[in-house]
Amino acid sequence: MISLLPPSSSFALKEWATACLLLKEGRQIVIIRKGGIDKADRDFTSDLSVDSEFLLFPTYEHQNQDLIKTQFHSDLLNTIEENDIPGLINLSAFATITHKFEVSSSDVLNKISKFHIWNESYTDKRINWKPTKPAVVALLRVYPLVQPQALPILDEYGSCKSIVDLGQDVPMGELLPVIQDVKYESMCEEISKLLEN
């Protein structure tokens, strides 16, 4: 799986810090989304397409231990402890979407439970919020940055929008995927079969 990556990026996807940690460490490749709360962002999932690229922007305010499987509670606490510099965001991974699925059923979504941190309370909330619209499951190929970049958190980052324009290019250097090709392709194939059957 050969991918030409840009030398820098100015866009970032907001995601729970705990999920960002697992994505960066290769313990998860899945994100589950439905349109954002911000009026301009309600249908943002239509813009999440295969080959979309972005930095991962860890967020903390909406993380909820009750929506994460028990075995990941320590990871959540670790992300909270690491968020110890007020006013700065640490960008430490870049990702590209390799697969995208629309899912309208909790039963189908829960088939891929072993591939992510969230429990059934979370997946049920995703499906049942705006039930006429499907949830989007995206599979991310993640590349840890050799030199993480700390940026000041600007007011415009604080809205409920999911895709953030950072207003500057963040250099990324030479990137290697956290999960090697064969393993990543195998995981994608297994998830695809579960979601399409």
Image (cartoon, helix red, strand yellow):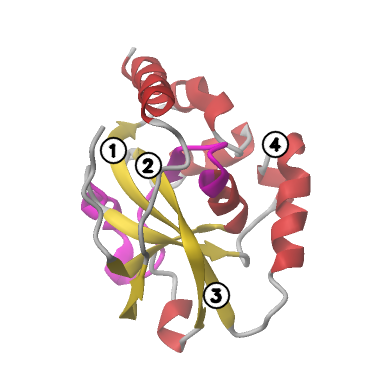
| Residue for point 76% across, 37% down | 70
Disc 2 to disc 1: CB gap under 8 Å: yes
Residue count near mark 2 (Cα–Cα under 10 Å), binned few <14, some 14–19, many ≥20: many
Q: Is residue 42 magenta?
A: yes
| 2 or 1: tag closer to the N-terminus | 1
- Looking at the image, is 84 positioned above or below residue 1? below
Mark seen at residue 89: 3
Region of the chain picked out in magenta, as a range:
23-49
Q: Is residue 22 left or right of residue 164?
A: right
Mark seen at residue 141: 2
Residue 14 percent coordinates (x, y): 45, 62
Disc 4 to disc 1: CB gap under 8 Å: no
Please indicate, yes or no, whether residue 141 appears anywhere in the rendered image.
yes
Q: Amino acid at mark 2?
A: Arg
Name the residue beneath numbered marker 1: 98
| Residue for point 52% across, 45% down | 23
Q: Is residue 150 left or right of residue 169?
A: right
